[in-house]
């Protein structure tokens, strides 16, 4: 086994070596053991939707293959794909629903430990929802906002409120295509219905249904999650913190919070700073409490409170391998079942908290808003109590940790760009139009052992920065680039082309902006809306010099995100192809024809540098279409930056 081919993160390499020595299996081992993976599955041409199957289509046959019912490869692959959208949209949206529930309980004074932390955003969202504000009590308004958001899930007819935030031109496209989501749950249910045996078998129509469900995620469930979390937990502001496994200390109680929903982890993190808990940790022989996050729960508590990040998706097992984790508290999504097995080899307590996600033989401390503070305290105490069981001779914490700046939002970037008294995207639009900044890229998504860990993100972003593209990130992509030192303002000297460097220097921002968790991709949509509204770069999102990528995606949620991005007009490159390549017409539809329908399409490219070039080509095409100036500085300027970066930078 060569750890260096598995990950470019040296902290992870160290833990993989340890795992190999101790005979502990990780996702990489299991992925290798799984090879060769099922070709039918990868091509998307197996179907087990009904009991006449499973059916599979021979991709090498000259004749068109059909399942027992007569379904073709295009029908089968399209059905499989949109079922992935439905599952992904359901996950994001259920997250949003839970936050709406917490907001209502808080407004009704039935929750413990929460309050309205951002009244300004509350009033803004209330106004958008048509809720009276005036002299009304904030809690009354919050109740109505929570209820209105709640009702968006079950709405049967009409259009989702936040869909009206999209540029008018895009909304018109959605109406014409009949993909403007009516209600969040309704579109998910309809996808499940349409993909039953013997319902929808026109792959284009199946994709239309999937797109509608995905838009209900991006402009519905995810956006509700983001906005209501800001109201409840506070809107982020830029802050500095640290990232990678080296954030843990051998003399503190170490807790990992992992998953996606921050309502509990935000409280847990807050409580670890309370004097009573610090005292309890000291009594247990520790010098304090360290909380490090994994996956998007990490991004949430980083964005709002500055808690450090321990790692991204593929580092969850590795965190336990440090031997220094006293408790790993998980909520929902992206939690590997194998954590239980790794934890058995150390003293680490894995604690599940959601009634929706239990693991066999794992301690379950169930979270309910009504006693959230008490539950959070109980969990912190459990971690403190477990500190005494740590075997110090087995502690091996990698040294690697890196500074990062996070906390950007569509709202605060407005003020950062425009200045204290004039919130505006004008300086960004002007920099794009003048050819200082080539365009903007959104780089998001997971890790996947099929792609060298973090390298997909790092190489792609490095190429974009060199060519003066401003990068906005969320999720595990942001964590990967943060570990490489790209999320600090100083990184402009190592990575950015001259025009981008000048722009970031003038404003004082890093060239890669951390916009939060996966549901916060809704913030990226709103940033794109901000650029459209500022005028000059395009009249809808599809006209902007903007592209997106998910170089290492793995989750069904990423399929939903990809579809709402494309349906919103954003060209999207995927490092791992959708499982559709066995369906030629569907593949052509997704990667070519969609552009003439919604203004954007997908591309599949596993080489991150080639993927970045596809994005740059797209951005350049949009610049030409808008008759923008050629780039201000010759290519050579950026190349010099890259040479310098390669000489000086050691990838952590
Ligand atoms: Fe086979 Fe058709 Fe049933 Fe799918 S729906 S398993 S293709 S018979
Ligand atoms: S956590 S969905 S692995 S980005 Fe949002 Fe990371 Fe992907 Fe989970």
Image (tube, rainbow, N blue to C red):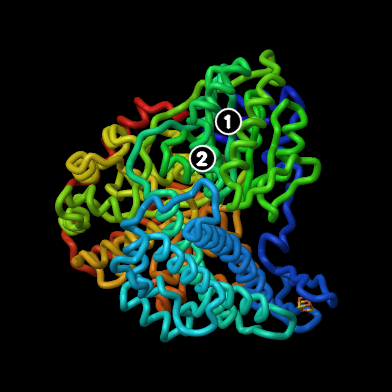
Residue 484 at x, y = what percent? Answer: 43, 34
Circle 1 — which element? helix
The residue closer to the viewer here, 292 or 100, is: 100
Please say if 529 is above or below 428.
Answer: below
**Residue at (74% x, 24% y) in the render:** 22
Residue 584 lies left or right of residue 531; in this view the side is right
Packing grade of label 1 (10 A; few <14, some 14-19, many >=20) is: many
Cβ–Cβ below 8 Å for labels 2 and 1? Answer: yes
Which residue corresponds to the image point at 45% horizontal and 54% vertical from the top-left? 229
Q: What residue occupies the far top of the structure in this picture?
A: 393
Q: Mark 1 — residue? A: 12
Residue at 37 percent of width and 78 percent of height: 171
Residue 461 lies, in percent from the top left, at 39, 45
| Occupied quadrant, residue 82 | bottom right
Is residue 585 something that shows in the picture?
A: no
Q: Secondary structure at mark 2?
A: loop
Say which residue label 2 marks.
454
Q: Which mark is residue 184?
A: none
* First of labels 2, 1 by sequence position: 1
Identify the residue shown where x is 66% and y is 46%: 353
* Numbered circles on residues, count: 2
């Amino acid at each position: 086994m060569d750890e260096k081919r598995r990950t470019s993160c040296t902290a992870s390499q160290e833990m993989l070596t340890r795992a190999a020595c101790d005979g502990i299996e990780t996702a990489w081992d299991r992925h290798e053991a799984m090879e060769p993976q099922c070709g039918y599955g990868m091509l998307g041409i197996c179907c087990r939707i009904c009991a006449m199957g499973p059916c599979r289509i021979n991709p090498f046959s000259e004749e068109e293959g059909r399942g027992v019912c007569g379904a073709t490869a295009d029908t089968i692959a399209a059905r499989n794909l949109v079922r992935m959208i439905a599952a992904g949209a359901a996950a994001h949206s259920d997250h949003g629903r839970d936050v709406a529930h917490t907001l209502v309980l808080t407004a009704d004074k039935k929750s413990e430990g929460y309050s309205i932390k951002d009244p300004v955003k509350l009033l803004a969202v209330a106004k958008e929802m048509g809720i009276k504000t005036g002299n009304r009590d904030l809690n009354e308004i919050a109740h109505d906002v929570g209820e209105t958001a709640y009702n968006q899930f079950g709405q049967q007819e009409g259009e989702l409120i936040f869909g009206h935030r999209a540029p008018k031109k895009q909304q018109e496209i959605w109406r014409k295509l009949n993909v403007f989501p009516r209600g969040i749950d309704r579109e998910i249910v309809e996808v499940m219905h349409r993909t039953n045996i013997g319902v929808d078998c026109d792959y284009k129509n199946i994709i239309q249904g999937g797109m509608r469900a995905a838009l209900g995620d991006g402009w519905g469930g995810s956006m509700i999650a983001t906005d209501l979390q800001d109201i409840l937990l506070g809107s982020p502001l830029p802050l500095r913190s640290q990232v990678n496994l080296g954030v843990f200390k051998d003399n503190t109680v170490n807790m990992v919070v992992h998953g996606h929903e921050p309502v509990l982890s935000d409280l847990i993190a807050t409580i670890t700073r309370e004097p009573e808990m610090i005292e309890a940790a000291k009594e247990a022989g520790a010098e304090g409490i360290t909380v490090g996050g994994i996956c998007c729960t990490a991004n949430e508590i980083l964005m709002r409170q500055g808690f450090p990040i321990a790692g991204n998706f593929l580092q969850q097992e590795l965190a336990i391998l440090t031997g220094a984790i006293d408790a790993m508290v998980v909520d929902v999504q992206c939690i590997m079942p194998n954590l239980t097995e790794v934890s058995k080899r150390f003293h680490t307590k894995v604690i599940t908290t959601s009634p929706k996600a239990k693991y066999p033989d794992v301690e379950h401390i169930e979270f309910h808003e009504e006693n959230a503070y008490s539950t959070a305290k109980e969990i912190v105490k459990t971690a403190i109590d477990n500190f005494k069981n740590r075997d110090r001779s087995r502690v091996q914490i990698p040294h690697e940790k890196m500074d990062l700046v996070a906390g950007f939002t569509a709202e605060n970037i407005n003020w950062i760009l425009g200045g204290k008294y004039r919130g505006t995207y004008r300086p960004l639009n002007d920099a794009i139009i003048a050819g200082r900044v080539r365009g903007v890229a959104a780089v998001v998504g997971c890790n996947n052992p099929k792609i060298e860990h973090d390298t997909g993100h790092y190489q792609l972003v490095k190429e974009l920065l060199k060519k003066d593209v401003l990068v906005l990130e969320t999720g595990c992509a942001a964590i990967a680039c943060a570990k490489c030192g790209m999320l600090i303002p100083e990184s402009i000297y190592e990575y950015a082309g001259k025009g981008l460097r000048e722009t970031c220097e003038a404003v004082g921002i890093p060239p890669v902006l951390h916009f939060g968790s996966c549901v916060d991709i809704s913030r990226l949509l709103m940033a794109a809306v901000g650029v459209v509204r500022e005028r000059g770069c395009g009249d809808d999102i599809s006209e902007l010099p903007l592209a997106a990528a998910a170089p290492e995606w793995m989750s069904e949620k990423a399929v939903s995100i990809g579809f709402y991005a494309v349906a919103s007009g954003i060209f999207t490159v995927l490092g791992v192809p959708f499982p559709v390549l066995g369906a030629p017409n569907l593949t052509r539809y997704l990667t070519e024809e969609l552009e003439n329908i919604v203004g954007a399409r997908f591309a599949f490219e596993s080489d991150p540098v080639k993927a970045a070039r596809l994005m740059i080509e797209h951005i350049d095409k949009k610049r030409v279409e808008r008759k923008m100036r050629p780039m201000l500085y010759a290519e050579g300027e950026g190349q010099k930056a890259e040479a310098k970066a390669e000489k000086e930078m050691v990838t952590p």
